[in-house]
Amino acid sequence: MRVLVTGGAGYIGSHTVLLLLEEGHDVVVVDNFSNSSPESLRRVAALCSRAPRLYRVDLLESEKINQIVRDLAPDAVIHFAGLKAVGESVAKPLSYYRNNVTGTLNLLDAMESAGCRNLVFSSSATVYGESTELPLVETTQRSATNPYGRTKLHIEEMLEELAAADERWSIAALRYFNPVGAHESGRIGEDPQGIPNNLMPYVAQVAVGRREQVNVFGGDYPTVDGTGVRDYIHVLDLAAGHLAALDYLTDRTGSFVWNLGTGEGSSVLEVIQAFARAAGKDVPYQIVDRRPGDVAENYADPVKARLELGWKAERGLEQMVQDMWRWQENNPYGFPEEASDSYDNDELNEQLLKAASTVQSSSKPNNEGNQK
Ligand code: NAD
Ligand code: UD1
């Protein structure tokens, strides 16, 4: 199948592109590198000895997107591209609506005019807002507490209305819980810009010595040890969920929604302790005030995805932190920095082909972290 992946150079996108290539799919990536770099895809190509086709383009450039979708005629699109920082979305709501909502509209228009109507969309457990009915089931009422969450909610609604209006569309919205971990090679992983907003990358940066200690947001929640509980899911399990959704859509039309979570919650302290064991060192922390907008606990009901997609998360917290640590230890400052416009599309694609033809001398990860 030919799959167009928007945001394919990013954290979840790069792991999914790798899995798609390993499964023999023909992959086209569209990314503007606003929160990633082509290096992730060079490493993907080297890992599986296959190259995706890459276009550096912004979803807001509607003409270019139209042309790419028309020329390449993908069988399906997986749509990861979006801005995702909750705090930033509060400070810059218009950028979030423009990038996420208008970007998605442009993509849908391009798909419509090219006659490609199979879409898998990255939604988020954020659409459950502050719901405290646990576990969170797909039918739980949706709400949003910030502009980022509202973009996901609006897009979900748009997609449902589109599928209701035109029965040729097949659309899956996947509600991710808390994606963490990295590919087991330690070659690709999450590379947050600036101070990480999310717990696991912050813990990883403390363990590697880039930050002093973890600030634990609240120690008085009504949970197992007073700290917040979340459903962490390994990024490779998440990637597999996308392939299962693509498969499901091949002979069905309509709009569908699935939680992608493990169904198990872990507290902040459990995460810190597991990480410390994986890294073989102490991870210092202090309990500070609660973060506004946080709920005490949330975790998925993953049953719908298991029954309908035949998918379930296979990896537990120990593996998540081990893989995350391998990536962080080998790339303490993430991917090497490079200007996003260093190369044109032809050069980028040549690099990917070259990376794909490089024989990996050893499966042992290289230490290539640079200083940022
Ligand atoms: P990421 O930032 O690593 O990846 C997103 C990619 O999209 C980046 O490579 C970025 O450069 C690209 N992009 C952004 N706007 C673009 C545009 N206008 N045109 C072209 N490319 C653009 O993020 P991620 O963690 O891989 O998340 C992928 C998707 O999953 C996002 O939509 C995010 O909202 C959603 N999601 C992520 C999480 C999480 O915790 N990581 C949780 C729930 C949902
Ligand atoms: C956050 C976002 C959510 C988004 C998700 C994935 C908020 C309020 N929610 O969810 O919209 O979909 O990320 O990107 O920002 N914690 C600490 N110290 C830290 C960081 C986090 O104690 O430095 C705690 C939090 O209070 C929470 C847990 O760790 O209990 C997980 O936090 P985080 O990784 O930010 O994810 P969510 O809050 O679930």
Image: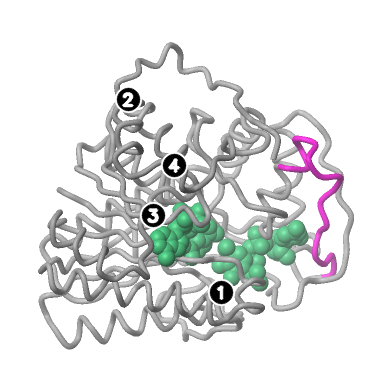
Instruction: Please provide percent x and percent y for residue 10.
Output: 46, 50
Give neighbour class at mark 3: few <14, some 14-19, many 20+ (Cα, 10 Å). Answer: many
Q: Which residues are magenta?
A: 205-220
Mark 2 packing: few (<14 Cα in 10 Å), some, or many (20+)? some
Please tell me which residue is depicted at 88% across the width and 60% down the height of the picture. Answer: 287
Look at the numbered disc 2 and give the secondary structure of its residue. helix
Give the amino acid type for the residue marked by disc 4 in the picture: Pro
Select label 4 or label 1 by which is in front: 4
The residue tagged 1 is 134
Asked if disc 3 is less than 8 Å from ligand 1, the answer is yes
Whole-percent x, y for residue 53 in the image: 26, 43
Q: Nearer the viewer, residue 192 or 285?
A: 192
Please give the residue where the numbered disc 3 appears in the rendered image.
Answer: 31
Q: Please report whichever mark, 2 or 3, sits nearer to the chain's N-terminal start.
A: 3
Q: Quadrant of the C terminus?
A: top right
Report how far apart the C-alphas of labels 4 and 1 lie in the structure: 39 Å
Q: Is residue 159 above or below residue 107?
A: below
Residue 252 at x, y = what percent? 13, 68
Most foreground residue, 357 or 167 = 357
Q: Residue at x 54, y 30 (%)?
A: 186
Q: Answer yes or no: do the residues labelled 2 and 4 have beta carbons within 8 Å?
A: no
Which of these two is toward me, 223 or 349? 349
- SS of the residue under disc 1: loop
Coloration of the structure image = one colour
Residue found at the very far top of the displayed protein: 361
- Which amino acid type is marked by label 2? Lys
Q: Is residue 33 above or below residue 166?
A: above
Instruction: For marks 2 and 3, give the CA distance.
Output: 20 Å
Q: Amino acid at mark 3?
A: Asp
